[in-house]
Structure formats: structure tokens, C-alpha cells
Amino acid sequence: MENKVKISLLGCGWLGFPLAINLISRGFQVKGSTTSQDKLAIFREVGIDPFLIQFSTSGIDPDLHDFLNADILIISIPPGRRSIDGIGNYRKMAITIADQLRISKVSKLIFISSTSVYPDSNSTLTEFSTVNPETESGMVIKETEDILSSLDMKVILLRLSGLIGPKRMPGRFFAGKTQVPNGLAPVNMIHQDDVIGLINCLIDSETAEGVYVGCSPSHPSKEEFYDLAARAEQLEPPTFISEKLRWKLISSERTGKELKFTYKYPSLIDWLKQIHT
């Protein structure tokens, strides 16, 4: 039986596309956005109602009236990391979305944020920790959080650690490199399957609101994790300097205590060993 709840998903890339397919399998009516004309037909084939949406500081604001005719909006697009235009366009997205949400029927907003809003404070950080982004992308994400949090609706900020999974394997990050610093720093990552499960949990919850963190509860050192990650992909393992300089350890307290969420991949090392064998 088809679910009458309508979900609009702004951004159907590495995370958004499999999320959309998962939501459709649960019976939700899903609208999805892309910046590529070529992907519209692909979306239709899998049951996503496609929308071509782009945000640009030099272009005309898109009309999102039909796209925002939904009960829930999920924003799942990262800011451009290597381009001033990318950062500016992301800020434009936040402002445009907020303006048009104020006259929409959307009642719940889930913004896929990042733990890059937290500094390397040499401490354990949770949903309740002070944010102080140290990168330009982290700063614009925090700006977006503030803009969206001002809306008169239920707003959920899901801050995710490093994303891993299909087509985003971590072995290549340091493969073949030598004397990589900070080898004893803890790794903060989360598998794609767990992100999708967590988003579903937030959709289903009637009380969820505010900040939540998505991060695997295991935190191996960089040298242990990336050595095994490279071997799992049959790449040359890196070597690290066994030191612990600036670091942070992300702990997702609310997901366990309030949402009772259970990670499919609680151990990053066990996940890598499954791939390696």
C-alpha cells in the first residue's frame, strides 16, 4: 500500500540516490533533484519524480513551489570544497530554500550536515558540544544550519562524519604515502547503509528535533584503519608517524539514547576485514 507521506530530496548523489530508492521501497512518494539533465530519465526509471534544480549566485533563483509540495524535505548536498563559486552557490541554496520553505507545506526538515563544524579540540565531541568550524566548507555548513534552524518547523540537523561505502572506499586516501603525520589520531566515519538507516529513524520519529550525530561507535587509529583499508583494496599500504597531534573523537549520544538506533557496521575494522577476506 502506498504511503501518503511525500518526501522531497534535494540532492540525489552518492547518498541521496540510494536513500531515495530505499524510501520508495518503503512506500513513500519521493521527489528528487539533480543538476544533470541526463539523470532525469534515470530517476523516472526507479520511481523518483525528477526535478532539475540549480543554485547559482549569478543565476535566477529556481521556482521550488512544486518541489516543496511535500511533507518532509531532506537536504543532501555538500558544499563545493575547492571553489569559491561552490561555497557561494551553497550559501545561495540555503537562503533560497529558507525563503521558499516559509510559504511551503513542509513540516519536517532534515538537513544532512557534517561534523566538520566541530574543531579538532583533542577531546570527545557530541551533539551538545560547541561548534567552531576550521575550514571554509565547515563554516558555510554552520551558516546553513543557523539559517534553517530559524524556520518555524521541525528542523533536524544530522551531522555526519566521514562517509564510506560503495564507490567511496577509504583505501585510496593514503595509499602508498609515507610518514603520514598524526597516525594515532582516532578515525570518525560512518557507512552509507547506517546513514540511510539513521535518516529513516529520524523520519519515523515523532519527537526527533535539533542536532543528531551520525558516526560509527568504533574509532580505530588512522594508521590501523588506513593500513587495512589499503590492503582491502589491494593497494600499497601507507606508513604513518605514530603520534597523536590534533584530533577529535565524535560520539553520537542522542542516536543511541533517544532513537535507540543500532549500527549495522559498529566496527569499522570488522567491516574492512570482511572486504579483505
Image: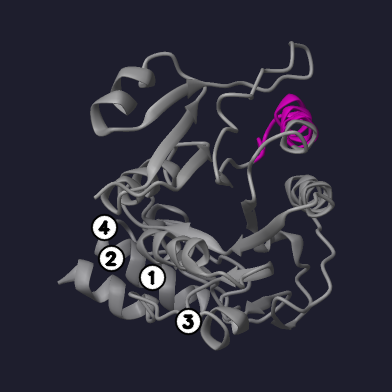
Residue that carries the numbered disc 3 in the rendered image:
220
Q: Tell me where the magenta segment starts and ends, as one range.
A: 79-97
Q: Which one is nearer the viewer's eye here, 59 or 74?
A: 74
Res. 251 visible in picture: no
Residue 277, located in which quarter of the rendered image? Answer: bottom left
Quick one: SS at disc 4? loop
Q: What crowding class fits label 1: few (fewer than 14 Cα within 10 Å), some (14-19), or many (20 or more)? A: many
Q: Which mark is residue 233?
A: 4
Instruction: Give the residue number, with chain letter if any, for mark 2.
Output: 231
Residue holding disc 1:
227
Assign the magenta stretch its main secondary structure: helix
SS at circle 2: helix
**Residue 157 shows up from this direction:** yes
Q: Point out the frontmost of discs 3 and 4.
A: 3
**Label pair 2/4, CB-CB below 8 angstroms:** yes
Q: Nearer the viewer, residue 169 or 224?
A: 169
Q: Amino acid at mark 3?
A: Pro
Q: Is residue 143 magenta?
A: no
Report x, y in % for residue 203.
50, 61
Q: Amino acid at mark 2?
A: Arg
**Residue nearer the viewer, 129 or 260:** 260
